Amino acid sequence: MMQPRVTIICLCYNHECFLAEALDSVLAQTYPNLEVIIVDDSSTDGSVAIIQAYLAKHPQITFISTGQNVGNCSAFNMGWQASTGDFIIDFATDDVLLPERVAQQVEAFQKLDKSYGVVYSDAAYITDASEYLYLHSQKYKAAPDGDVFAEVLRRYFICPPTVMVRRAVLEKLGGYDATLAYEDFDFWVRSAREFKYYYLDKVTTKRRVHDASLSGKLYKSGDKMLASTVVVCRKAAALVQTQAEQQALVQRLKYEARHAYLTANFREATALLHLLETTVALPVTYRVIAYLSKQKINLGFLRVMYHIVKGK
C-alpha cells in the first residue's frame, strides 16, 4: 500500500545565505512519497541561481516564480494550489527540517481520525550561523490535543514551521487569506474552529532566528502586521461559541491593545479596544488607554523603560 503523499512547499524570498541548507534538509527526508515545490517570491539576491542549480540536479522538483513580490500568503497559495499532496508543509527556506520530520508526522496522522487537521511539534531555534539557541518547548507549553481554539485565541504556543496540515483543511479554508500581512494567527484561528490539533512531542525542525524575520518586526509603529492582527481578531470574535472562548478572546484583545497603544499604533489600538468593548465592559485601565489612544498621546517610553529594566 502506497504511503500518503506529502507536499513540502519551500517558500523563498532572499534566502540566498540559507537556501542550500534548507533544500538539502528537504532532500534528506527519510519519507519516500514526497512532492517538493519551490516558490520564489521574486527574490532580488542570488536565490534563483541556487534554485536553478538544484533543479538541474533534481528534476522532480517543481519550481514556481511569482513574477512579482506578492508576499508569503499569496506565494504559499500558489504552491498549494499546484500541489497534489495529502498533507502539506509550509516551509520557509531559512529554516531546516530534521531527516525524520515528515515520517514522524505522517505516522502521527495515521493514528488519528480525520477530525484532526494539524500536527505540530517542538523545534530547536538556531542563529544565522546555525548555532543552537534553545527549544521552543522551553519557552512555550503546548496545548492539550484536540480542540485548541480557545488556547489559540489566548496565547502563542505553536511553532509555525513545525506544522503539517491535512489537505482537507486548506481546501475547507481556501488557503491563506492573501489580504493579510502574515498567515499564522489567521490560519490557527480558522483551522482550529473546524479541526482538531495534535502535538507531536519531538523536535522535528530547526527554526532560524535572525533580524530580518517577520516576527522581529511585530509591534513597530506603522507595521502592517498589527493591522492584520485586528482583522484576525474580528474574525475570531465571529467564531467564538463558548464562555471559555470569549474569555480567551478578551485576554488576547487586552494584550494586543496594550502593545498597539505602547507602540503608537493608535488606530489599531482603538479598533482592538472597540472590539473588546463589544465583548465585555472596559476595565478602568483600558478606558484610560482608549482615551489616550484617541488623543494620540504617546507613552511608548514606558515600554522601552520596561524592556531596559527587564534586560538588566
Image (cartoon, helix red, strand yellow):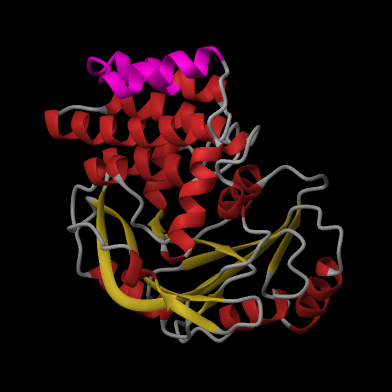
> Does 273 appear in magenta?
yes
Q: Tell me, yes or no, whether the highlighted magenta stretch contains residue 109.
A: no
Where 268 sits versus 72, above or below? above
Residue placed at 53% from the left, 30% from the top? 299
Q: Name the residue: 27% across, 29% down.
A: 250
Q: Where residue 129 sits: x, y (%)?
A: 66, 82
Q: Quadrant of residue 223?
A: top right
Quadrant of the snapshot with the N terminus: bottom left
Q: Is residue 88 visible?
A: no
Q: Residue at coordinates 73% horizontally, 42% vertically from top-left? A: 70
In the image, 248 versus 286, the foreground residue is 286
| Nearer the observer, 159 or 271 | 271
Secondary structure mainly formed by the magenta segment: helix
Magenta stretch in the rendered image: 272-295
Viewed as shown, does residue 138 lie left or right of 88? left
User: Viewed as shown, does residue 181 lie left or right of 117?
Assistant: right
Say whether residue 45 is visible.
Answer: yes
